[in-house]
């Protein structure tokens, strides 16, 4: 889990900050990019079914995200 160190207040939890800083830098440099191509919302039976249909059709490229936010 991404925030395990802060949740459990581990001795090395500063490493979480350092990792997030590194990822932020890589995103800013466009060395890491999102592969999300489609977002369905909100999280409902309809959107879950729709996402499965897209995948089953074999035409999905990238990630399909089902979300209540963004």
Image (spheres, grey):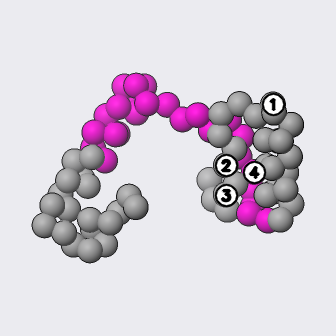
Front tag of 1 and 3: 1
Please name the residue that numbered disc 2 is placed on.
65
Q: Residue at x 31, y 72 (%)?
A: 7
In three-dimensional space, the C-alpha distance between marks 2 and 3, rounded to whole angstroms, equals 6 Å
User: Badge 2 local density, few (<14 within 10 Å), some, or many (20+)?
Assistant: some
Q: Secondary structure at mark 2?
A: strand
Label of residue 40 in the image: 4
* Disc 3 to disc 4: CB gap under 8 Å: yes
Q: Dot 1 surroundings within 10 Å: few (below 14), some, or many (20 or more)?
A: few
Residue 67's disc is: 3
- Disc 2 and disc 3 in contact, CB within 8 angstroms: yes
- Judge whether 21 appears above or below 3 on screen: above
Q: Which mark is residue 59?
A: 1
Q: Residue 52, image x and y in percent? A: 80, 50
Find residue 43 and report its horizontal and vertical position in percent: 74, 63
Q: Is residue 43 left or right of residue 33?
A: right
Range drawn in magenta: 20-44
């Amino acid at each position: 889990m991404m925030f395990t160190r802060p949740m459990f207040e581990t001795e090395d939890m500063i490493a979480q900050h350092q990792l997030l800083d590194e990822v932020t830098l890589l995103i800013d440099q466009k060395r890491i990019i999102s592969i999300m191509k489609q977002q369905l919302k909100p999280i409902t039976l309809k959107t879950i079914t729709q996402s499965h249909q897209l995948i089953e059709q074999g035409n999905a490229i990238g990630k399909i995200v089902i979300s209540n936010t963004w």
